[in-house]
Amino acid sequence: MISMLASFASVMTTIGYIALAVLVLLLMITIHELGHYLFGKWLGFKIEEFSIGFGKAIFKKTLKSGEVFSIRIIPLGGYCAFAGEDEDDPDPNAFNNKKPWKRLIVQFGGVFFNFISAIIFAFILLLCFGYDIQKVSSVDADFQTNIQQNDIIREIDGIKVDFITDNTANNLINQHYNNMSDAEKANYTLVTVDDVEYKCYNNLELTVQRDGEYQEIVANLYTYVEIDKEGNESTKLVLGLTTTPYQHTFGEAIARCVPLAAAFAWKVLVFLWMLLTGGIGLADIGGPFTTISTIAEYSQQNIVNLFVFLPFIAANLAVFNILPLPSLDGSRMLFTTIEWIRGKPINRKIEGYIHFVGLIVLFALVLFVDIYHLFI
């Protein structure tokens, strides 16, 4: 009976995190559509409906302006429907009757709001939880080191610890060991801790922030050999301490939130480039269901992970939607720009057909990769 209750509680917890992940994805999409809506209102566009979700409406309210606000049953999307967006409409405030530069602003509004939200979420992450810069939470007495509790590790071998440049603490420590010469690797002392034999190297140069001041220290780097189940050996690196992400001050978070959001966006672009060039495969991408599953899984491990996903997903949506792919904002902006240059639009029916086919292909693709993930 106790086992059954525990299993039920575990299932309900998992369902709760899945629901949380769905809400996160819905929040991001709503922010995107809100960008289109607010810029449309500002520039006098006629808006027919603002919808959160797809499918059958479970809530609908018509405002005095004639706009419809709705919440729909499928929480995996949303839209801001403008009058005359995909067809001719005599109303001077219809979408395609507005000047091209105004349409470009409205079309860019979703991407803009996603990136602004990425900056805000990055600020919250840095201020409340920290991310890439590490603070020493405890030091193992069995390992000798010049590092002290509450030290903030700012630089390793003179290189600033910074996710933006891929110089995380782990990357820099691995880089330090890989760059050591054979003579340096041969210059060690043996230390045994809990029956494990470590090689101790006293050559790791750190810049730490201690009691508000920056200090240069030389720390010990310990290595040991680990053998996996298949008998493969690998060298593990240890400093003899535990760290937690450093919570930035308000000023530090303000200064770093924009570069960090930009770094998340850049990572998405690099990922897409690797996808196009074959550097990664289908196993590394996923649609909305895979995204929800991933958010739920990592949030259940540690709720702080959720706050890492927020700026990353926001930046992801901003980058993805600016791509000139049919049905996405980038493609619509491209058609509007061509119209502005030509002085007349491309045939509306042809443009609508291109966007429609693009939308079908996009839905088919994300559905395929989600199904693919079920079988790998």
Image (cartoon, rainbow, N blue to C red):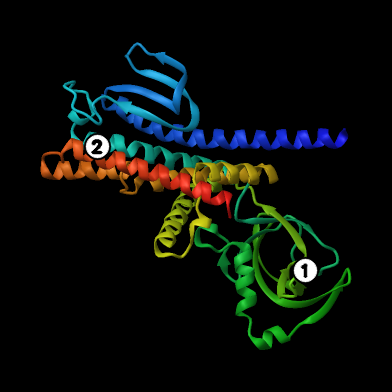
Q: Nearer the viewer, residue 326 or 262?
A: 326
Crowdedness of circle 2 by 10 Å Cα count: few (<14), some, many (20+)? some
Residue 257 higher or lower than 170, as above or below: above
Q: Nearer the viewer, mark 1 or mark 2?
A: 2
Q: Quadrant of residue 139?
A: bottom right
Q: Between disc 1 and disc 2, whose residue precedes? A: 1
Amino acid bearing label 2 = Gly
Which quadrant does the N terminus fall into? Answer: top right
Question: Which disc number belongs to residue 352?
Answer: 2
Along the line of sight, the residue nearer the viewer: 152 or 305 = 305
At 36% from the left and 22% from the top, the residue drawn is 49
Direction top: furthest residue: 64
Secondary structure beneath dot 1 equals: loop
Do labels 1 and 2 touch, CB within 8 Å?
no
Q: Could you tell me which residue is drawn at 45 percent across and 46 percent down?
A: 366
Q: Quadrant of residue 89?
A: top left
Q: In the image, what residue type sits under mark 1?
A: Thr
Disc 2 is placed on an element classified as: helix
**Residue plotted at (24% across, 37% down):** 352
Q: Which residue is mark 1?
A: 145
Identify the residue at horizontal 34%, vertical 36% (top origin): 109
Visible in this render: residue 49?
yes
- Looking at the picture, how far across and down is residue 107, in whole percent? 30, 37
Q: Nearer the viewer, residue 288 or 92?
A: 288
Q: Which residue of the protein is positioned furthest toward the left in this rendering?
A: 343
